[in-house]
Image (cartoon, rainbow, N blue to C red):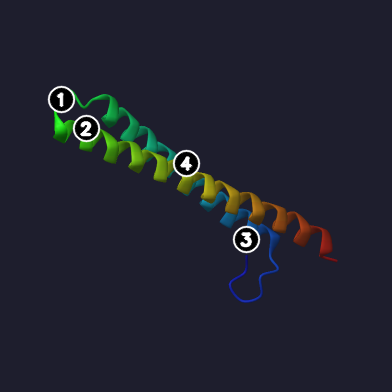
Amino acid sequence: MSVTDGTDPTAALELAHRFRAAASRVHGLAETAARALDGVAYEGPAASRDRSRLAEAAAVLRRSAAGLDDVAAAIQRLAVVLAGTLP
């Protein structure tokens, strides 16, 4: 959106694209955390804690990425509405 008035559909689409790109990066981080979780190759109390922490980190990253995807979709819908209201 335009920084000044919020009525530029092209700017809104660009902003949605930026949110989708951020979501993609966060999805990638979640996958990296999941692979690290699979790679914990030792046992004991520390390994259990590490697995638990990595699993929670991956879950948080997935939820964050889903939130970014939702924001991008909302901004895209706004862009469509803005485009339809322009003369």
Residue 85 drawn at (x, y percent): 83, 64
Front residue of 61/26: it is 61
Counting residues from the N terminus, which is met first, the one under dot 4 or under dot 2?
4
Q: Amino acid at mark 3?
A: Ala
Element type where label 2 sits in the image? helix
Counting residues from the N terminus, which is met first, the one under dot 1 or under dot 3?
3
Q: Is residue 35 above or below residue 74?
A: above
Instruction: Characterize the local packing of mark 1: few (<14), some (14-19) or many (20 or more) Cα atoms within 10 angstroms.
Output: few
Q: Total of numbered circles in the picture?
A: 4
Q: Amino acid at mark 4?
A: Ser
Front residue of 19/56: it is 56
Q: Amino acid at mark 1?
A: Glu
Picture residue at 64% right of the left edge, 59% below the top: 12
- Which residue is tagged 1? 43
Q: Locate the N terminus and report the quarter of the image it occupies.
A: bottom right
- Rendered image quadrant of residue 83: bottom right
Picture residue at 21% right of the left edge, 32% below the top: 48
Residue furthest to the front in view is 45
Picture residue at 52% right of the left edge, 50% below the top: 68
Picture disc at residue 11:
3
Gap between marks 3 and 4 measured at Cα: 20 Å
Front residue of 87/84: it is 84
Picture residue at 66% right of the left edge, 75% below the top: 5
Q: Is residue 5 above or below residue 37?
A: below
Counting residues from the N terminus, which is met first, the one under dot 2 or under dot 3?
3
Residue 26 drawn at (x, y percent): 42, 44
Residue furthest to the bottom in view is 4
- Which residue is tagged 4? 24
Instruction: Characterize the local packing of mark 2: few (<14), some (14-19) or many (20 or more) Cα atoms within 10 angstroms.
Output: few
Instruction: Characterize the local packing of mark 3: few (<14), some (14-19) or many (20 or more) Cα atoms within 10 angstroms.
Output: some
